[in-house]
């Protein structure tokens, strides 16, 4: 039937072969175009995922920088507190030294006062004895004068 249209046997066969080859090649190119389009969509999706991941990485990098700054700040604060504690420790050592010196001086003063009190007591006893002796002598002299009131030559 086709041979009738094209007027011979070989030409129709070639046309059919060309048509079949055209259909196969066209189908192959359509399939390739479909694969390319599908790969392009996958590539676009992967590119979007990469963009999202890059944004997340960028956010994480900013968070990391903030944490580094915070860590430096905390390290500085920790160092400052350690220095303050060292100053407080030194001041406490000075205060303890002063307290110990004051306690030692207080013990010395207490001992001196006790010694002074003891010396005062001894002095009072000695002065009392001296006064008692003087009073006794004066009493004896007055008794002698009283007994010898009529004797002006008596030695009292």
Image: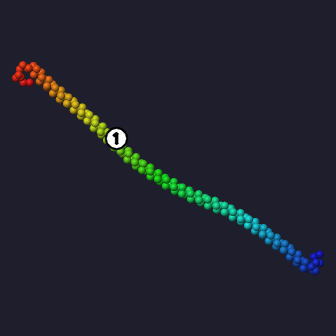
Q: Position of residue 57 (x, y in %)?
A: 62, 60
Give the residue displayed 75% in from the left and 68% down from the top. 36
Q: Name the quadrant containing residue 29.
A: bottom right
> Could you classify mark 1 by the number of other residues whose Cα lies within 10 Å: few (under 14), some (14-19), or many (20 or more)?
few
Give the residue displayed 42% in from the left and 50% down from the top. 87
Q: Secondary structure at mark 1?
A: helix
Task: Identify the image quadrant of the N terminus.
Answer: bottom right
Which residue is nearer to you in this view: 94 or 3? Answer: 94
User: Is 76 on the left or on the right of 150, as rendered?
Assistant: right
User: Is 15 on the left or on the right of 150, as rendered?
Assistant: right
Q: Name the quadrant containing residue 132.
A: top left
Q: Which residue is mark 1?
A: 103
User: Is 63 on the left or on the right of 35, as rendered?
Assistant: left
Coloration of the structure image: rainbow
Q: Position of residue 143 (x, y in %)?
A: 12, 21
112 shown above or below 75: above
107 shown above or below 16: above
Give the residue displayed 15% in from the left and 25% down from the top. 136
Q: Position of residue 103 (x, y in %)?
A: 34, 41
Task: Identify the image quadrant of the C terminus.
Answer: top left
Q: Position of residue 116 (x, y in %)?
A: 25, 36
Give the residue displayed 82% in from the left and 70% down from the top. 27
123 shown above or below 92: above
């Amino acid at each position: 039937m086709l041979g009738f249209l094209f007027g011979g046997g070989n030409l129709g066969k070639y046309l059919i072969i060309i048509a079949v080859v055209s259909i196969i090649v066209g189908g192959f190119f359509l399939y390739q175009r479909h694969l390319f389009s599908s790969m392009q969509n996958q590539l676009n999706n992967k590119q979007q995922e990469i963009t999202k991941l890059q944004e997340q990485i960028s956010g994480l990098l900013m968070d990391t920088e903030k944490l580094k700054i915070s860590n430096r700040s905390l390290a500085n604060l920790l160092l400052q507190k350690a220095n303050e504690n060292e100053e407080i420790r030194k001041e406490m050592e000075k205060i303890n030294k002063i307290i110990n010196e004051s306690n030692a001086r207080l013990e010395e003063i207490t001992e001196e006062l006790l010694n002074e009190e003891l010396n005062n007591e001894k002095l009072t006893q000695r002065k009392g004895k001296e006064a008692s002796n003087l009073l006794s002598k004066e009493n004896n002299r007055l008794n002698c004068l009283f007994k010898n009131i009529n004797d002006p030559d008596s030695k009292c």
